[in-house]
Image (tube, grey):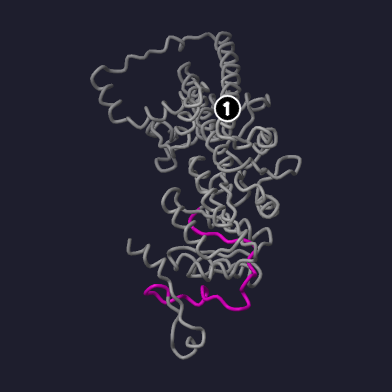
Amino acid sequence: MLRVHRVLAHCVAPPALRGFGFAAMSGDKAIPASLQVTAEQEGTADVGIVGIGVMGSNLALNLLGKGFTVAIWNLELEVSEKFIADHSQTFAEGKVIGSATYEDFARLLRPPRKCLILVTAGKATDMVIENLMRVFSKDDIIVDTGNAHFKDQSRRAEQVEAKGLRFLGMGISGGAEGARKGPAFFPGGTPSVWEDIRPIVEAAAAKASDGRPCVTMNGRGGAGSCVKMYHNAGEYAVLQIWAEAFATLRGVGLGGDKLRQVLESWKARGKLDSYMLDLTCEVATMKDAEENDGSYLLEKTADMIGSKGTGLWSVQVAMDVGCPVPSLAAAVLARQMSMTRPERLANQGLVGDLVQSELMQLERLELDKFVEDLYWAVYLSIIASYAQMFQSLRIVDQEFKLDITPNLPRIISTFRAGCILQG
């Protein structure tokens, strides 16, 4: 709580005193010179970013590279100071600026102010929103980019709009690399925000093969976060399908380069060409660089993975509104099962490995037919996962009035680049 109070209690020494040995102060810390706002900097920033972690710093660099002036704010002043020091020479003078207090941060932004929040989802986000509402003015725009439940974003939209401000809950897909090079964005919130924020997010977004930016307004309230939730659930499902395809090919005696050859032949046929198939091909044949003995890294990798919660939320909401999502639910359950690895290993020690493959002796013609059948099984399973994802969005939209359905064709088109589901 001490750090929270320090954020709320930021104070700055009067400019007239700074030349007489008085340092600007933030809480009980001196403000670095690069974070002391000058009159010339006021109102010059096109967009602000709160939270200069991995995602925030990469998105800031993306926007700077597109010619925007970016104002940054971070709880740890040394993080902001280092970011400005590292990148101020790369871009034109005055393009990357920062502040130590929320009051000064607001001074840097050109009205209507636009701020993207890239902090840990949950209470930290709510604290940032409260501070921004304290210093922002009518019609200014607050954008939360975290992996939040769409119901929380609808609540935040009502809270922000009640103060005369505007809100977007905008999911980002593509990870840190996407944030830097161009992600897919999923914005939803106050309808009037779109035309003000559009030039910024379209410039930063990934571009599809026809040059169109991978972003469109998804709807009102928590619509953007709702789309991102089901995007993530679809991602879980497709990743699980590839994991099972990999395990099945291993079960018939294919591994390493031979397995990769099968996957690459599937990719060449076009229908399954996707970012996640590229990842599967890469992982399948990645060697252990440390041992340098020709062994595959996957053979030494624990069969467990974590979860951010968005997939589980998606399945829970789908069940609540009566929309069956067997593929999405199975993928979530598989992730949860993977987290119980110690228990699974203990059980294996008690009963042994009872699974035996009877397919290892397949003749060449039989193997070719088996691989072809598996190709179509994977293809249809992925289609089923997408169908469940999009049907869930329609049914959820009917229940919660998010205006997603009229925008769904445009939303689907934004999946073509930048995001994990691109393909």
Q: In which quarter of the image is the N terminus?
A: bottom left
Say few, some or many: other residues with alpha carbon within 10 Å of mark 1 (under 14 / 14 to 19 / 20 or more): some
Kind of element beneath mark 1: helix
Q: What residue type is labelled 1?
A: Ile
- Residue at 44% across / 37% down in the picture? 309
Q: Image height check: is 225 above or below 135?
A: above
Question: Is 197 on the left or on the right of 251, as rendered?
Answer: right
Q: Provide residue 296's location: percent of width, then percent of height.
A: 44, 33
Q: Where is residue 390 in the image (x, y as percent from the top left)?
A: 60, 28
State the residue position of label 1.
Answer: 395
| Closest to the observer, 376 or 381 | 381
Looking at the image, which residue sits at the far front?
A: 162
Residue at 58% x, 63% y: name it.
137
Note whether 408 is above or below 101 in the view shown.
above
What residue is at 60 percent from the left and 21 percent from the top? 379
User: Which quarter shows the C terminus?
Assistant: top right
Specify the segment rendered in magenta: 26-54
The one nearer the camera, 363 or 357, is 357
Position of residue 254 in the picture relative to residue 275 (left or right): left
Q: Residue furthest bottom?
A: 20
